[in-house]
């Protein structure tokens, strides 16, 4: 697969992310620097192939765009049809969500003991160019929904191979379920280098 990258945006993004994780910074510093790197990528919506931005009416799509060879980070496109949302879930690793197209609502939650998760503050609406940070140390439980009447696409960067990380989903009845998300359509990891079509 090839990224539509006539101006080298994807190449620069990957180079900057690899240089960032090579520095072995704390999660807090990686998130801070990574926010600017991802914001530069999602500032312009002209590089993601249509095949990785097509919705599925049954459920949202999670396409692996890049996996660091040592699984230090992964990059994923999430594609949402109208009305789609995630369960309340956590990540267990640092993450960044950059809005590329459409809009999303992200509602934070806190979970303690057997009680159902409780919302924290108002939902945040993400518009193109916005970046949200996920830090397990500060609380990384949220629910994400498509906030637009059309297709929404966001680009996620995680501090591991997110398709293999065991995470938790939280029911409103207090039930907690462990899950591993994998990727849409059983995709194998891709190593996109920004080669032109």
Image: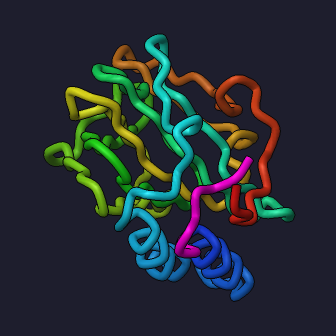
Where residue 55 appears, as percent x and y from the top left, is 46, 25
Residue lying at 30% horizontally and 22% vertically, measured from the top left:
82
Where residue 56 appears, as percent x and y from the top left, is 49, 19
Is 153 located above or below residue 60 in the figure?
below
Where residue 111 appears, as percent x and y from the top left, is 39, 38
Extreme residue in the right direction: 69
Extreme residue in the bottom direction: 23
Residue lying at 79% horizontally and 45% vertically, measured from the top left:
189
Is 21 located above or below residue 178 in the figure?
below
Q: Nearer the viewer, residue 197 or 24?
A: 197
Count the numbered circles shown: 0
Is 102 located above or below residue 173 in the figure?
below
In this picture the colour scheme is rainbow
For the C terminus, the quadrant is bottom right
Q: Nearer the viewer, residue 5 or 126?
A: 5
Q: Is residue 57 found left or right of 119 in the rendered image?
A: right
Q: Is residue 113 found left or right of 4 in the rendered image?
A: left
* Res 108 → quadrant: top left
Residue lying at 63% horizontally and 56% vertically, measured from the top left:
3
Is 190 located above or below residue 149 in the figure?
below
Q: Which residues are magenta?
A: 1-9
Residue 26 is covered by the magenta coloring: no
Q: Nearer the viewer, residue 164 or 56?
A: 56
Q: Nearer the viewer, residue 65 or 140?
A: 65
Residue 4 is covered by the magenta coloring: yes
Q: Magenta stretch mostly in which secondary structure?
A: loop
Residue lying at 34% horizontally and 43% vertically, measured from the top left:
110
* Res 36 → quadrant: bottom left
Where residue 162 appears, as percent x and y from the top left, is 66, 46
């Amino acid at each position: 697969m090839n990224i539509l990258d006539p101006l080298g945006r994807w190449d620069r993004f990957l180079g900057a992310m690899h240089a960032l994780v090579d520095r072995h910074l704390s999660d807090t510093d990686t998130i801070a620097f990574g926010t600017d790197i991802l914001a530069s990528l999602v500032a312009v919506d002209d590089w993601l192939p249509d095949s990785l931005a097509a919705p599925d009416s049954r459920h949202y799509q999670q396409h692996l765009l890049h996996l660091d060879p040592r699984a230090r980070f992964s990059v994923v496109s999430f594609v949402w049809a109208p009305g789609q949302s995630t369960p309340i879930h956590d990540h267990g690793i640092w993450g960044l969500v950059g809005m590329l197209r459409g809009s999303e609502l992200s509602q934070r939650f806190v979970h303690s003991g057997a009680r159902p998760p409780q919302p924290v503050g108002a939902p945040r609406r993400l518009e193109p160019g916005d970046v949200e940070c996920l830090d397990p140390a500060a609380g990384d439980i949220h629910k994400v929904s498509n906030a637009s009447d059309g297709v929404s696409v966001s680009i996620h960067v995680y501090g591991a191979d997110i398709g293999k990380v065991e995470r938790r989903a939280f029911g409103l009845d207090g039930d907690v379920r462990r899950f591993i998300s994998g990727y849409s359509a059983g995709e194998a990891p891709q190593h996109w280098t920004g080669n032109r079509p």
